Amino acid sequence: MSSQLKNLSDFSHTTVPSGANYKFGIIVAEWNAEITGALYNGALKTLLENGVKEENIISLPVPGSFELTSGAEILLSKRRDIDAVICLGCVIQGDTKHFDFICDAVAQGVTNVSIKYNKPVIFGVLTTNNLEQAQDRAGGKHGNKGDEAAITAIKMADFSANI
């Protein structure tokens, strides 16, 4: 597996534009709060470090990863000034097919909201086999998916503004 020896949150190979001119929404799932809290902290820190003003970040919790889609939909329907939405969640494989249904629904839902509003909606959802893998990707040895989602949001907001 290519990620075994790699920090996936290394951005030294790319240029990240300033986020100073953009407004972002962060929708974060409360389920698996230890993990999603770390993802949120990473995303927030990364946005701020890249010039986004604190008052230009709207953070809203939803109960679980399944609700990320409706959270993004509601935010974009009420706040047309948002340039990108970051959806943060964590779904850990269990003994039933529930994992597959949730992961598929959230991935499709995030895509559909993005297309509907013509705004970047970023999939910052961990879909792991176990808690250790989630911890490794929420500030552990493989970096922080929240950081990655924030960088993606900044880059896509800038892309959208400059097309």
Image (cartoon, rainbow, N blue to C red):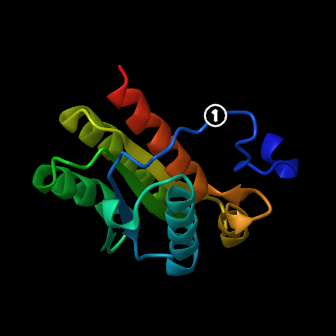
Q: Quadrant of the N terminus?
A: top right
- 95 with respect to 86 (left or right): right
- 130 with respect to 91 (left or right): right
Q: Residue furthest top?
A: 163
Note whether 147 is above or below 3 in the view shown: below
Note whether 50 is above or below 59 in the view shown: above
94, 111: nearer the viewer: 111
**Percent coordinates x, y for residue 63 in the rendering:** 32, 74
The residue drawn where x is 79% and y is 46% is 3
Q: Would you name the residue on which mark 1 appears?
A: 15
**Percent coordinates x, y for residue 17 in the rendering:** 53, 38
Residue 25 in view of the camera: yes
Note whether 92 is above or below 87 in the view shown: below
47, 30: nearer the viewer: 47
Residue 127 in view of the camera: no
Residue 144's image quarter? bottom right
The residue drawn where x is 45% and y is 47% is 19
| Mark 1, other Cα within 10 Å: few <14 / some 14–19 / many ≥20 | few
Q: Residue furthest bottom?
A: 34
**Percent coordinates x, y for residue 24 in the rendering:** 35, 54
Note whether 131 is above or below 5 in the view shown: below
Residue 26's image quarter? bottom left
Q: Quadrant of the C terminus?
A: top left
The residue drawn where x is 29% and y is 54% is 69
The residue drawn where x is 70% and y is 50% is 9
15, 72: nearer the viewer: 15
